[in-house]
Image (tube, rainbow, N blue to C red):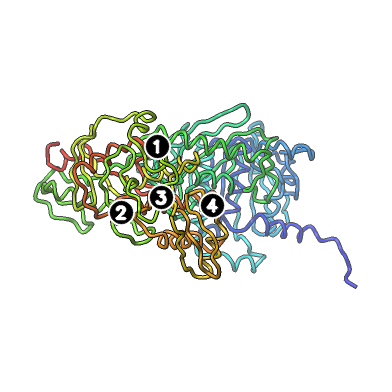
Amino acid sequence: MPIIRQLPTSVINKIAAGEVIERPASVVKELLENSLDAGATRVDVVIEKGGAEAIRITDNGCGISAEQLPLAVASHATSKIADADDLFRVATLGFRGEALASIAEVSRLTLRSRPADCEAGAELEIVGGKAEPIRPVGCPRGTSIEVRQLFFNTPVRHKFMRTTQTEMGHITEAVTRLALAHPQVHFTLTHGGRLVHDLPPTTNTRDRVVTLFGSELAESLIEIDSADEQIRLHGFVANPTQSRGNNRLQYLFLNGRFIRDRALQHALGEAYRGLLLTGRYPICFMHLEIAPALVDVNVHPTKMEVRFQDSGRIYSQLLGSLRSKFLTTDLVARGAVPENSQDSVSEAITADNEIAASTPATSELFEWAKRQLNTPDNGGLAAQPSELRSTDSLSLHPFTSVDRRTVSETSEQSSYRSDAAEATVPRPPSSPAALQIHNRYLVVENEDGLEVIDQHALHERILYELLRDKVLAGVLERQRLLVPEPVDLASSEAAAILENREVLAQIGVEIEPFGGDTVLVSAYPAMLANFSPADVVRGLAEQLQTEGKQPDVRDLLDELMHMIACKAAVKYGDSLTPEEVTALLDQRHLAQDHHHCPHGRPTALVFTREQLDRQFKRI
């Protein structure tokens, strides 16, 4: 029979180290948090060989007295909480009292410290958890901790350390997170004698973003500030023109603590829905200030995960604040025309493919602008180009042409009417004359200069928002077939279609089982009257099977509306008459966000007069 025994303190600390100290970056994070809790206004971080050889962190905080040094490195000894009730009102970054003990157990640690009211400092050295006698030492006010040979006595953990570059990357990220959370503190980071970051104190997070991520990203930031009685949300999000292929630039801070929270990240993604391409992630630097009693930070040893008392409220506040801000922000994509050298008009084109100093022709500028836009949309099913012949103020697509096999459900729903539109939506003055180039883009003059518009993307956004409004209002026009049409599907497709019949009905598609893998289509959206029911249903089935999992109803409905709008919109390559071009431009006011198509592509690029003048050497 196995014998139960009490584990030695050394083993307990090594277990704790396995939970808290994952790699050198974990040491940096824990020590930096201690420095900030000590009230430091400057913290210097010095690293050797990615932290494997040495980590030294020096601060000008309150310091630790000589008699307190043994307790500072003892397991579960802390000055930040006194009893269990304090766990529900934690206002510091650290509070568990296990970080220093864990670090000291798996390294050679030297701690020097001096409080402001002491003439001399004290030094404590610990090797693999075994402490040497404390000795006096001369040192400035504050604390300096040096960690050498991390994991020297735990070879298994040491074996899992990565290359110097990889470990240094993690350390830089740890410093970045705390520097963004506490811009009022001066941080420096040095590696191998080279200064990596020197971040002087500032009152504005944007200044830190400039230093850490560059001015281009910082200039795209949109300020957010929302507060109620208990919660304040403030910081910056990036214009949709700036995004990433992962969520690593989503910095969320709770009371100065960097956190990862799936609900808040989801709210962020929802706010950008339709503004970013699939697979792209928004960028944010958001601070959440909330009463400590309303959040539990004692969920995970690394304190990166938290539990909110009312997560739904915070989710709604973040989502609502971002959406409201976007509706009042100019999100038009700006054309970044390369600047030519002003010193000579005879410079050769460089190896970096910079634009030569010679003046480009206007047609060449248009060609350059076209290359900046995305390639034709390949979403949805292949279909014949839509016939764009109606200049009705609400319908550019063939809503009024009813297939012989169909009949409108009601006379009021058979088509959009101009008089109804004029009664509810004020029509703007007629748009200025526009030029269609290559049956793809529309070029029009505006107050700033000129605008190059993707005809398909713009029409798709207009149709999507009209469709969404009608689905929400329950008045979507649908065409009911005089004779239901059978559609043969694959087994998986039929199952997906029949399983989601109620959702499909909300977008005007009525489906009935017909036996086997065949379904009957009795009605489908009026805006798709020029497409066969079979093509529509197969396209829907493909969408329903995306990612091979049961989709969220809300997300599914939105994706289906995207698909319908894409199919019904004028296509990339359709030739438009001048009247049709004018009608399309006149409808831009019908969309809340006509700057992006539902998939997140820009609908237009603006080139200012100054940019054009610069290209023509008038500046």
Q: Specify the amino acid type for callout 4.
A: Val
Cα separation, mark 2 vs mark 4, equals 31 Å
**Camera-side mark, 3 or 4:** 3
State the quadrant of the C terminus: top left
Tell me what residue is drawn at x 32 percent, y 42 percent: 333
Residue type at the position of mark 1: Gln
* Circle nearer the viewer, 3 or 2: 3
The residue singled out by tag 2 in the image is: 374
Q: Amino acid at mark 3?
A: Val
Q: Are marks 2 and 1 in contact (CB under 8 Å)?
A: no
Which sits in the foreground, 500 or 181? 500
**Residue type indicated by callout 2:** Asn
The residues bearing labels 2 and 1 have C-alpha atoms spaced at a distance of 22 Å
Residue 200 picture quarter: top left
- The x and y percentages for residue 90 are 69, 38
Q: Secondary structure at mark 4?
A: helix
Say which element carries label 3: strand
Q: Nearer the viewer, mark 4 or mark 1?
A: 4
Q: CA distance from mark 3 to mark 4?
A: 22 Å
Q: Earlier in the sequence, mark 3 or mark 2?
A: 2
Residue 592: mark in rendering:
1
The percent coordinates of residue 214 (x first, y second) are 38, 44
Judge depth for marks 2 and 1 and give the one in front: 1
Mark 3 or mark 1, which is nearer to you? 3
Residue bearing mark 3 = 407
State the residue lying farthest toward the right: 1
4 or 1: tag closer to the N-terminus: 4
In the rendered image, the vertical position of residue 490 relative to residue 271, given as above or below: below
* Residue 74 x, y percent position in the rendering: 75, 49
According to the image, label 4 marks what residue? 503
Q: Position of residue 29 (x, y in %)?
A: 59, 49
